[in-house]
Image: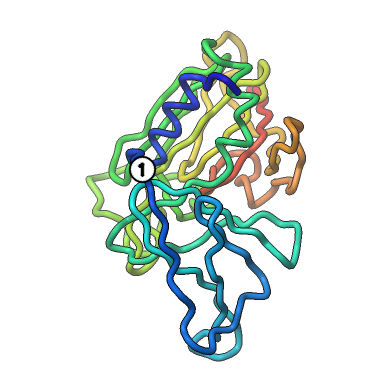
Amino acid sequence: MAKLSAVLVAMLAMLCPAASFATVIPTPPYPGASPSLAYKVAADGQPIFTYRYPTYNQFSWMDCASFSMTGKVHVTITNLVSERDVRACYIRPIAYNIQPVYRVVAQMAPMIMAHQGKDSITAVRLNQGDAPKRVALGNYTLELSYTGRGRMPIAPEPKPQQAQAEPPAGQPGRGGAGQAPMEAAAIPIAAGPHEFYMGGGGFRIAFTANTPGPETVGLGMVQEGKFVDGKWVVTRQLGGDDIGQGEILTLRPNTILRVVVYRYD
């Protein structure tokens, strides 16, 4: 594409560190290293030796690729044993707080371009401790609350009685022991009067109607999926406990959702 939409550029700026000229130096494999049977890794097109080693309990395998870099690099992880996308990875050292950016934005690029300049698209980012963000989108107002890597419990949120301390490690907003909180970022798009696509992650999202009619908004259909050649492909239909019986919507990291809402009294 000759031009990127302002929203796409803004979203990339949210998710990526400041760009600079990058170099990649692969770490040579140690003597006797076993190559991975499950993954292939490249950084800026340069193959990186990927090896496997047994975990501490000796009952499963870990796969690792090691390289040094300066600036922003594009890392491609290829699954060699199935057609499923790689959904997560861990980057060390943790102290550097390097956050991966997955293919969500690239998949959504055609839809982003189609909604460029309209009031049907926006971009949101939050850090742990930030107040929820409210955005008007089409016929609804969305309230996005930070959850980070955690999953919100399937229960109504209690009304706050007093200021609460940060949740402990492993709870919503945290990434587990030793892992820094992620920055939540998302691109919500109103594709129709009651239809939305949302890419990114780290949020709980609530809907409020901003046009006359029934006040209560429910989740009618929630699909997890991906765009292939610009077409929506469903990989998972969410329901029941996944969406709190139609009342709770969580956008988990590196996910694209298609959401259809409805209104009732």
Q: Would you call the spot at circle 1 few (<14 residues within 10 Å), some (14-19), or many (20 or more)?
A: few
As shown in the figure, which amino acid type bears the numbered disc 1? Phe
Rendering coords of residue 163 (x, y %): 22, 46
Rendering coords of residue 97 (x, y %): 32, 56
Report the residue that reaches farthest toward the top: 212
In front: 146, or 105? Answer: 105
Identity of the residue drawn at 67% across and 71% down: 38
Figure disc tally: 1
The answer to whether residue 47 is left or right of residue 178 is right
Q: In this view, does 66 lie above or below 119?
A: below
Q: Residue under label 1, please give it.
A: 21
In front: 69, or 221? Answer: 69
Identity of the residue drawn at 29% across and 39% down: 130
Rendering coords of residue 40 (x, y %): 62, 64
Identity of the residue drawn at 58% across and 43% down: 103
- Give the position of the C terminus as an image quadrant: top right
Coloured how?
rainbow
Q: In which quarter of the image is residue 84?
A: bottom right
Rendering coords of residue 153 (x, y %): 50, 53
- Give the position of the N terminus as an image quadrant: top right
In front: 166, or 86? Answer: 86
The answer to whether residue 210 is left or right of residue 92 is right
In front: 141, or 235? Answer: 235
What kind of element bears circle 1?
loop
